[in-house]
Structure formats: C-alpha cells, structure tokens
Amino acid sequence: MANLKELRSRITSVSSTMQITSAMKMVSAAKLSRAQDAITQMRPYSEKLTQLLQDLSATLDDDTSSKFAEDREVKNVLVVAISSNKGLAGAFNTNIVKGVKYKAKNDYKSNNLALYTLGKKANDVLKKDYEVYKNNNAIYDELTFENVSEIAEELMQLFLDEKYDKIILVYNQFKNAATQFVQHEQFLPIEQFETAEEKQLDYLFEPSKIEIVKELIPKSLKMQLFKALRDSFASEHGARMTAMHKATDNAKELRDDLKLSYNKARQASITNEILEIVGGAEALNG
C-alpha cells in the first residue's frame, strides 16, 4: 500500500485536475450556448435559400445552367476538412480524421486527392499522409460571414479553373451537446436539382430568372460553407463540454477512492503504533 505522503500528494494532484476540468466545462458551456443560438438561427435561412435556388434552377434550360453545376469527369478531388485548433474535445477531431481517411480509401482511390484544412488538429494528422493544398487556422479567430466568404470564393475559383473537379466538405454537424454527426457534403459541383415538372412555381421575377440564379448560387455556396463552420464550432464546444464533464466525474471518483485508501492506510498506521506502544509497555512490565 502506498505511504501516506504519496497518497496525500496524489489527492492534491487529482483535486487540482478536477478544478481545471470543471472550469473548462463551464467555459465550454457558456461558449456552446452562443454557438448553438447562432447555428439554430442560421439553419432556416440557409435551408430556405437552398430551396429557392433549387426551385429556380429546376426551371432553367441546360444551356443556361451555372458553371458551378458542371458535372465533368472527376480527376482531382479537394476535401475541405473542418476541425478545431484545440484538443480536449473527446473524439471531435479524431472523427474528422477518420471521415477523411474513409472517403480517401473508399470513394476516391483512383483520384488525385488534396486537402484544404480548416483547423489545426486535423491538419497536424492528415498532412502526414495526404497533400495539403492549404491550411487556415486563423478563421476561428473571427468566424464571420465575410471571412468565410473569402474562403468560399477561393474554393469556387479553384473549381472554375478546373484545378479540382469535385470539392467535398467534411465536418461535424451539431445535434446537441452530447451528439455530433460527421457529414460528407458535396460543395461543388452543385448537385442536380429536381426537374421542372416536379415543381409548381408561382414567382414573379425582377430582374430575369437567370440573373437571379447567377446571383443566388455564389451566395448559397458561401452560406453552405458558413453553416458548416458554424455547425463545427458548436459541435466542438458541445464535445468539449461533454468530455470535461466526464473528466470531472472521473477525477472525483478517483479522488474519493484515494481518500478511502488514505483513511485505510492512516488507520492501519495508527493501529500499528498502538500495538507497538502496548507491546513496549508489556515488555517493560514483564
């Protein structure tokens, strides 16, 4: 059994760790509340924008369709891996790495695959096995629509220049604090919409329908990327809050076990001292 000094040292250490994880849990809970509100408010707008774009595009002729919807032979694929800059978030970043590797192994084995990493953690792992076209860690310093739009415009230009024939987003979609799902979402080319026969539209267009679609497509793509980053941001804090909650509970359980061991060791030490005193007294009397 460990001596009393060692047990006291371990109890102090575990108690300090428990205070740290508890504080990190509270910080993540506060950040999660704001991030959750942001993504919850954004989703209806993003979904309505996508629906409107689909409704309008379904009525256009093939020759007027956008270059962003061009479905060409897939030779080069760019995967946008969205992770975080910090750890201590459970399997949050590991799931993104696994998701990218799964895509690379099963879907794009015969294609030239490159990565555009948003966040430090996935980049640190994936750059060992794959070509990283670019890494951007600073986006989380100020996660605004304007900053995300610059990245979206860069991705759109890469597609228009035919440097990459397909661009995929891999990110964690937020459901609640304890649940996040890894999403593999096609960014470009824009996926085929429903046919005009399946749509019953009653819109008045000003200016023309084609001009509206040309304006909506870049805006919709920017919003798609912004929503993915917002989803990932909320998922990160939810995963970290859950991980720190479990770590705090584990530290508390370990501290209680150490205290029990300490009390047992202290009791055994006192008993031994009493026995030594009684044995010495009997020896003197004998």
Image: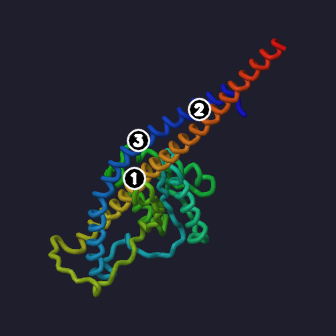
Residue kind at label 3, given as amino acid type: Met
Q: Residue furthest bottom?
A: 197
Residue drawn at point x = 33 percent, y = 56 percent: 39
Q: Nearer the viewer, mark 1 or mark 3?
A: 3
For disc 2, the neighbor class at 10 Å (few under 14, some 14 to 19, many from 20) is many
Residue located at (49% from left, 56% from top): 116
| 201 displayed left or right of 218 | left
Question: Disc 1 marks which residue?
Answer: 234
Q: Secondary structure at mark 2?
A: helix
Asked if 145 appears above or below 74 in the picture, the reply is above
Element type where label 1 sits in the image: helix
Residue 209: percent from the left, percent from the top? 22, 74
284 over 94 or under it: above or below: above
Which residue appears at 22% of the width and 83% of the height? 200
Q: Earlier in the sequence, mark 1 or mark 2?
A: 2
Identified by mark 1, the residue type is Ala
Instruction: Name the outermost residue toward the top.
Output: 284
Mark 3 neighbour class, 10 Å CA radius: few under 14, some 14 to 19, many 20 or more: some
The residue labelled by disc 3 is 26
Task: Quote the CA–CA distance across marks 1 and 2.
Answer: 34 Å
Q: Compare residues 23 and 279 and report the one nearer the observer.
A: 279
- The image shows residue 157 at horizontal and vertical percentages of 40, 61
Instruction: Tell me where residue 190 sits by quadrant.
Output: bottom left
Q: Quadrant of residue 223?
A: bottom left
Residue bearing the label numbered 2: 11
- Measured in 3D between alpha carbons, the distance from the residue under mark 2 to the one under mark 3, in whole angstroms, is 23 Å
- How is the structure coloured here? rainbow
Between discs 1 and 3, the one toward the N terminus: 3
Q: Position of residue 182 (x, y in %)?
A: 48, 62
Disc 3 element? helix
Instruction: Pick the quarter of the image with the N terminus.
Output: top right
